[in-house]
Amino acid sequence: SVGQIPDIKCFINEEPETIRENIESSVGLGLPQVLPHETQWEKTVGLVLGGPTLKDTFQDVYEKRKSGMPVITVNGTYRYCMTRGLIPSAMIMLDSREFNNKFVTPISKDVKYFISSQCHPSVFERLKDCQVWIWHVAGDDNYDLLDKEYGKEYYPIMGGSTVALRALHLLRLLGFPKFEIYGFDSCIIGDHHAYEQKENDGEQEIDVLVAGKEFRCTAAHYHQAREFVEMIGKTGQHYDMIVHGEGLIAHIIKNPDSLKKKEEVN
C-alpha cells in the first residue's frame, strides 16, 4: 500500500468549464481506469521528460530500453523517442488543451496510453483503436462527475501542475517504486526543451540559485521546481529516483532547501 499521502495544489492552463466538459466526455467512453497495483520492489522504470539534457542522456535510456527496462514518455518526449528508434512502454498526458493531440503521434499499437480525463476529446478520438487507460487529477472540482460514472471506484492522481510531477505518482500507483528520470531539468540549458516546442517560446525568464549554482529558468520551470521540493517533502519516502543530467532538479535533490530566486539573494 502507498499509504495516505497529503494532496498537493495544482494549477490549470485551461478554462474550468472546458476541463469539466472534457472530463464529462472522456469518462463516458467506457475506458479502463488506472488502478492500484501491488508494488514491484525490484522494478525500475525509465521516465523520459523533455528538458534539454535529454539530448545528452538519450543514448543511455535507449540502451537500457534495449536491455528490457520499461520506459515511459510524456507529451513531446513520446515523438522524440519514437523517431529515434525507442518505442516506449507507455505515454502519459495531462494537459487539457486541444493542440496537445499532436503529442500522441505517431500512434502505435505496442504502446499503452495513460490519458487524463481532463484531456481534449480529440486525443481520445486519435487513440480510439489503441491501448488506452484513463486517469483522473486529484485536486480539481469535478469529483461529482467521477462519482456519477464510477461510484467511489476511482483513484485521483496527486502531484503538482505538470505532467512530470503527476507521472511519478501515477507510476507509483501502478506499483513502480524506482525511477531513472531523463530530461528532468526545469531550467534552460541552451533551449527550454530538447526539441522544438513553440508553445513555450517567449516565456518570462528568471535566474535562480541552488547551493550557489546559478540556473536560468522560465517562470514555469521555477514553479515546477518549487512544487517538486514540496512534493518530495510529502511523498518522497514512497519512491526512489535517479535524475540524469546536470539540470536544476538534479541539484535540488542534493540541496532541497536551497532553491532561491537570485534577486532574493542579492
Image (cartoon, rainbow, N blue to C red):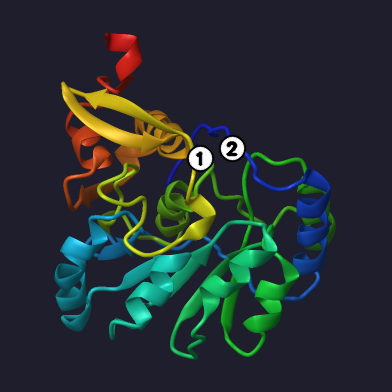
Of labels 2 and 1, earlier in sequence is: 2
What's the residue at 62%, 82% (across, down)?
127
Cα separation between marks 2 and 1: 5 Å
Secondary structure type for disc 1? loop
Q: In this picture, is 140 found above or below 130?
A: above
Among the 4 quarters of the image, the one containing residue 89: bottom left
Which of the pair 176/141 is nearer the observer? 141
Secondary structure type for disc 2? loop
Please state which amino acid type lies under the numbered disc 2.
Cys
Classify the position of the C terminus by image quarter.
top left
Q: Which mark is residue 10?
A: 2
Q: Residue furthest front?
A: 202
Q: Which mark is residue 160?
A: 1
- Left or right: residue 116 versus residue 105 is right
Among the 4 quarters of the image, the one containing residue 186: top left
Q: In this picture, is 235 found above or below 212?
A: below
What's the residue at 83%, 48% (across, down)?
17
Q: x, y (%) of residue 263? A: 34, 14
